[in-house]
Amino acid sequence: MKNPEYALVADNVCVQIGDKKIVHHCSFTATRGEFIGIIGPNGAGKSTLLKSLRGMLPVSAGEVKVFNHPIHRLGDKNAARLVAYMQQEVNVGFGFTALEVVLAGRYPYLKWWENERDADRQIAEKYMAFTGVTPLAHEPVNQVSGGERQRILLAKVLAQETPLIFLDEPTASLDLVYQEEIFRYCQTICKEEKSVFMIAHDIRLAAKFCSRLILLAHGQIVADGAPSDVLTVENLEKAYGLHSAVFFNKVTGNLDIHTYAMACNTNNQTLIHLIGGGGSTGTIMRGLYEGCYQLSAGVLQMGDTDTDVAIAFGIDCVLGQAFSQITELQLQKHKEKISQAHVVILGNLCYGEQNLDNLAAAFFATRLIVIEDTPITERDFTKGKATALYQKLMKEPKVQVMTSETLLEKIKNNEVC
């Protein structure tokens, strides 16, 4: 762990306050240019870890090195020339202007008797311009908005001109615009070969902007790596106790997370198969998944919105090529899943020659819920073949017909089975 390229090394770090162990055996390294988000539930030990990395809290075991220097041996001013730290709660004295606050970031480079020089003022003005607070230079900090105040404090941290920057929830209590601004500033800073550690409450924003995430729970590292490797269903369950789906959002191009407020019975063994397509079952899939039903689907075509939902929720489905006829192998797999299901749901599909076999496969269900939001005649593009098959299916005693709205209400009330 003596490699000079490391900006920071945490080696088996433990922190204990009184009789309480807060951080347990945390080890990782950081290189220049990384934007590292520290995430985890309340009480996970995020702030305690960050303070110990800065040397503000002593470690009970292990060691922290900054550019190969043990942080506890550096002394305050030497440490402040390598690491700038922005606390979660900062009390600014009454009457201090924005410029005066930012100039305070130059303290590591001044003797106790020295005043700020012209060069210090130029550096302060540079970072005030960077964070967009130049017009507030002579405004009292206690009279500006929350977002403006956070940008002033960020300018102060940047004015230290350190290669390492620690930010403890700098976006807390800010609206979305200011939150994104702070994250974007940090991305720009990292392009200058500075390394940023940020404790982040919003894991979606952290996934969008950070190059790397460290997930903590109960004072231990659950996962460390690229956002897509850290934010998994399993890791979110382990750290937050969340029932969730993690997927790449096609609209934004970002990693996205869907979490559920609905009480989830993880022991639910009811297997439900959905016959969908054309967006006819996406909302139903989501409702069933939130209810922790075991799900399968088919035959869905690649590029279909129902397919996107199924993939996002990790639903076991039979997939076919877009605008292609269902193959014999796909149909066989589809029928197998239908026969294994306790309940099959046939969506309010439009039928053409390519997906007519999906309608025929519904006959293999032991119990069938048919969604009818519009008459079959309005959804039949097979010159009547789908209508004839559908009407025959409706005569089966196993069939129960309802609207999407009715089914969603039943799902909400756990009345599907």
Image (cartoon, rainbow, N blue to C red):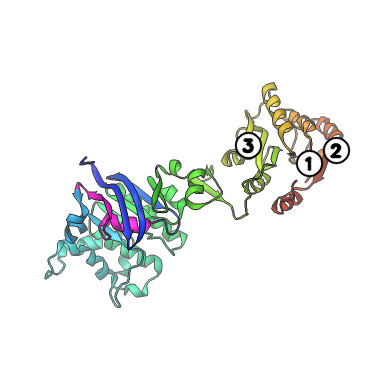
> Answer yes or no: do the residues labelled 2 and 1 have beta carbons within 8 Å?
yes
Looking at numbered disc 1 in the image, what kind of residue is underneath it?
A: Val
Determine the residue located farthest toward the top in the rendered image: 328
Say which of marks 1 and 3 sits in front. Answer: 1
Where residue 186 appears, x then y in whole percent? 34, 53
* Residue hosting label 1: 370
Which disc number belongs to residue 246?
Answer: none
* Residue hosting label 3: 304
Quarter-of-image position of residue 392: top right
> Answer yes or no: do the residues labelled 3 and 2 have beta carbons within 8 Å?
no
Quarter-of-image position of residue 396: top right
First in sequence, mark 3 or 2: give its number.
3
Where residue 169 appears, x then y in whole percent? 38, 59
Looking at numbered disc 3 in the image, what kind of residue is underneath it?
A: Asp
Segment tinted magenta in the rendering: 45-68
Distance between the Cα atoms at labels 2 and 1? 9 Å
